[in-house]
Amino acid sequence: MAYQPAMVPPKKSKRTLFIVFGVVLAICCSGGVLAGFFLFRAVQEATGPARSTAETYAEAIVDRDYPAAYRQFCSSVRDRVSEADFTRQQSSQPEFTGYEITGLNVSNNNGRVSGSTTIRFTPSVGTNVTQSFPMVKEDGEWRICE
């Protein structure tokens, strides 16, 4: 009787397992990146116009272009305060050399769209001045409505 070795099953390659794992991981990562991109775009579309109004206002204040800043106000503020009074009031304030928008919030509650922005102004002398402004959407445009 001749000696017959026991059957040894062939070794399964881990290579196939790693390839499958790599493909699944790549699909998941791609999905995460795409979801992040579309979420970022949705937030930009929601807050972009409000940010633009806040930046226009802040740049006008820094440039001491008070008529341009005044145009960013909602109608109720423009009804209460004349452009001349606003210009006179702002002219007496310290000069600002820069600004940073530190906060921006946009919300939609039962169809009423509103928001707020926080702007930190850098004066030529002294400490930073931080101001918060309520914002409303009026006639399709974002306006500062303090």
Image (spheres, rainbow, N blue to C red):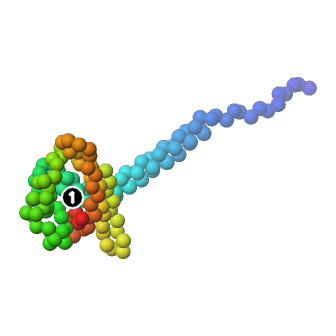
Could you classify mark 1 by the number of other residues whose Cα lies within 10 Å: few (under 14), some (14-19), or many (20 or more)? many
The spot of residue 92 in percent (x, y) is 13, 53
The spot of residue 143 in percent (x, y) is 21, 64
Q: Which residue is mark 1?
A: 53
Q: Residue 131, relative to residue 135: is it above or below?
A: above
Amino acid type shown at disc 1: Thr
Residue at the limit of the structure toward the bottom, as seen here: 110
Left or right side of 62 for 17: right
Query: Residue at the location (18% across, 42% down)?
Result: 124
Query: Residue at the location (15% across, 47% down)?
Result: 95
Q: Residue 49, relative to residue 4: is it above or below?
A: below
- Examine the image and state in which quarter residue 67 appears: bottom left
Left or right side of 95 for 48: right
The spot of residue 37 in percent (x, y) is 37, 51
Residue at the limit of the structure toward the right, as seen here: 1
Residue at the limit of the structure toward the left, as seen here: 84
Query: Residue at the location (55% across, 39% down)?
Result: 19
Q: Of residues 126 and 53, which is closer to you in this image?
A: 126
Quadrant of the drawing holding the C terminus: bottom left
Q: Of residues 39 and 106, which is closer to you in this image?
A: 106
